[in-house]
Image: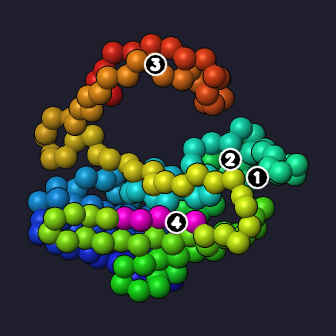
Amino acid sequence: MGDPLVLEAGGVRATILPADGGRIGSLTVDGRELLVTGDPDLKRWGSYPMVPFAGRIREGRFSFRGASHQLPLGSPPHAIHGVVWDRPWRVDDARTLSIELDERWPYRGRVVQRLALDEHEMTFQLALESAEPMPATIGWHPWFRRVLEPGGRPVVVDFAADAMLVRDASGMPSGERTVPPPGPW
């Protein structure tokens, strides 16, 4: 399925791991690793594609166009993060990877990642191609490090949010909104 793809420009180096779910396994800027690397749990490191759904599907059940479907429960009691993050991807060329949706998803399709890095920008594109209509959301799940240097201070994310969704006992949004707790996040 392919050796790692390495993109380098200026002080940035991105290592993409086709065999580990097509994830960005390492992203360094000026020698600082930005991502969590090498956790034994594939869901907890790097930055991996979530296709054809991001997040969770309650109890793995959904309906589309009158048909009901049951998905495997990747994080019981729910389905989680799609069906491509845990399988090897094919290397199409030095900057492109692809994978076919498997039997865990009721619709056929192909996912393509196109990656580019130069001295001014990093561009990662993710596309889902299908000959038939299907419900879908796509995206990457990044695991950013909280501390970028040994002995350094934790990274703090600062933003202003007016509300957040309350999660029920199983971790799913209840539909209720609440005021976010004070940061830092």
Q: Which region shows up in magenta?
A: 124-128
What residue is shown with label 4?
Answer: 127
Q: What element carries label 1?
A: loop
What residue is shown with label 3?
Answer: 163
Relative to 131, residue 158 above or below: above
Amino acid type at image mark 1: Leu
Q: In this view, does 174 lie to the left or right of 179?
A: right
Q: The C terminus lies in which quarter of the figure?
A: top left
Relative to 160, residue 113 above or below: below
What residue is shown with label 2?
Answer: 79
Q: Is mark 2 on a helix, strand or loop?
A: strand
Residue beneath the point at 49% across and 54% down? 139
Residue beneath the point at 63% across and 42% down? 56
Discs 3, 2 touching: Cβ within 8 Å: no
Residue beneath the point at 47% across and 64% down? 126
Q: Is mark 3 on a helix, strand or loop?
A: loop
Discs 2, 4 touching: Cβ within 8 Å: no
Amino acid type at image mark 4: Ala
Task: Tell me the CA gap for discs 2 and 4.
Answer: 21 Å
Q: What element carries label 4?
A: strand
Q: Tell me the tag on residue 42.
A: none
Residue beneath the point at 15% across and 35% down? 153
Q: Tell me the tag on residue 71.
A: 1
Lower sequence index among marks 2 and 4 = 2
Discs 2, 1 touching: Cβ within 8 Å: yes
Lower sequence index among marks 1 and 4 = 1
- Percent coordinates x, y for residue 25 in the rendering: 36, 64
